Structure formats: C-alpha cells, structure tokens
Image (cartoon, grey):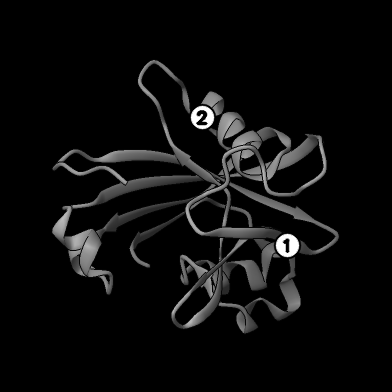
C-alpha cells in the first residue's frame, strides 16, 4: 500500500470456474482469510495490463479481462486496520470478471503480502469463508443471476 495521501487504483480479478471463486489464502492473528487476486496499477499501465501482470505475479496465470463487476472504495481511516489509517490509505478497486487463458493457479513469482496459497472457494458455501471485501459475499452467493456492475461503496 502507498504511504501518502494519493488514491491508488487497483485492478482485481473475479475468476469463477465450476461455481468456485479463485482466491488467495492468507493468515493473520484471527486465522485464515481470503482475497481476490490483483493489485495496484503502475504509471503508464492501463487497467487491463495491470490485471494481467498482477495475476501472473500473484497466482501464476494469464487471464483475459471481461466485464466490470464491482467497484469499491477502501478508505483506511474508516475501517478496522489502524496501520491503514495511519498511512492514509485510500484505494479504488475495479473488479473485473476474468477467465484463465493459460497457467495453473498457484503462488506466483511475487505473491501478495502474507499469501500462503491459492484456493478455489465454492460459491454455495462462500459465506463460510472470511473473504475480503466482505461485501462481495452476498453478490457472489447469487453470481449466476448477476447482471449489472455494482458500486460497493467504502467497505471492507
């Protein structure tokens, strides 16, 4: 994360196959939790390039970017992570439906901080996982019926 008052733009991949979500598994003092792959856009890089690069780095797959599914603000001072508030983190995440076009999901050459592994989470049991952002859970439960992009707001 950045350490300034800038807003960071991030491209994230929602990869669903066989009614399962591909997620990065991490661990903290409360146990295991999951995030979707992706990360910050670099200067002179478009969102599609950022998404492809981040998926190669984090989960060792090349993806094809499809439609926008979710947009989320994350303003650290409004959430439970004191380090994010202190560093004035503000991230705008654009989450795309993506499909794997090559590679096998596993930890990539530059896994996300704290990433242990890559796992497929069944959508019919998604509420049993500590997935961030939490606001995704209700939308992913009914993913087969999902049609329009959703602005999630400033959520964690």
For residue 111, the mark is none
Which residue is at 34% across, 46% downward?
A: 92
- In the rendered image, residue 129, in percent from the top left (x then y), is placed at 61, 78
Question: Left or right of 151: which side holds 6?
Answer: left
Which residue is at 48% across, 29% downward?
A: 47
Choose the circle earlier in sequence order: 2 or 1: 2
Q: Residue most toward the right?
A: 18
Vertical placement of residue 60 versus 107, above or below: above
Crowdedness near tag 1: few (<14), some (14–19) or many (≥20) residues, C-alpha within 10 Å: some
Disc 1 secondary structure class: strand
For residue 50, the mark is 2
- In the rendered image, residue 124, in percent from the top left (x then y), is placed at 75, 77
Alpha-carbon span between mark 2 and mark 1:
22 Å
Identify the image quadrant of the C terminus.
Answer: bottom left
- In the rendered image, residue 148, in percent from the top left (x then y), is placed at 56, 52
What residue would you read off at disc 1? Answer: 119
Question: Left or right of 21: which side holds 90?
Answer: left
């Amino acid at each position: 994360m950045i350490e300034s008052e800038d807003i960071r733009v991030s491209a994230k991949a929602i990869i669903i196959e066989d009614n399962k979500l591909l997620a990065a598994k991490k661990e903290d003092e409360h146990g295991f939790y999951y995030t979707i792959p992706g990360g910050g856009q670099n200067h002179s890089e478009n969102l599609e390039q950022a998404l492809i690069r981040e998926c190669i780095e984090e989960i060792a797959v090349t993806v094809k970017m499809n439609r926008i599914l979710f947009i989320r603000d994350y303003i650290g001072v409004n959430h439970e992570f004191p380090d994010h508030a202190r560093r004035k983190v503000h991230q705008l995440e654009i989450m795309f439906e993506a499909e794997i076009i090559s590679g096998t999901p596993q930890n990539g050459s530059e896994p996300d901080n704290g990433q242990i592994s890559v796992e497929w989470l069944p959508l019919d049991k998604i509420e049993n996982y500590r997935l961030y952002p939490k606001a995704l859970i209700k939308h992913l439960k009914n993913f087969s019926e999902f049609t329009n992009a959703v602005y999630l707001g400033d959520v964690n």
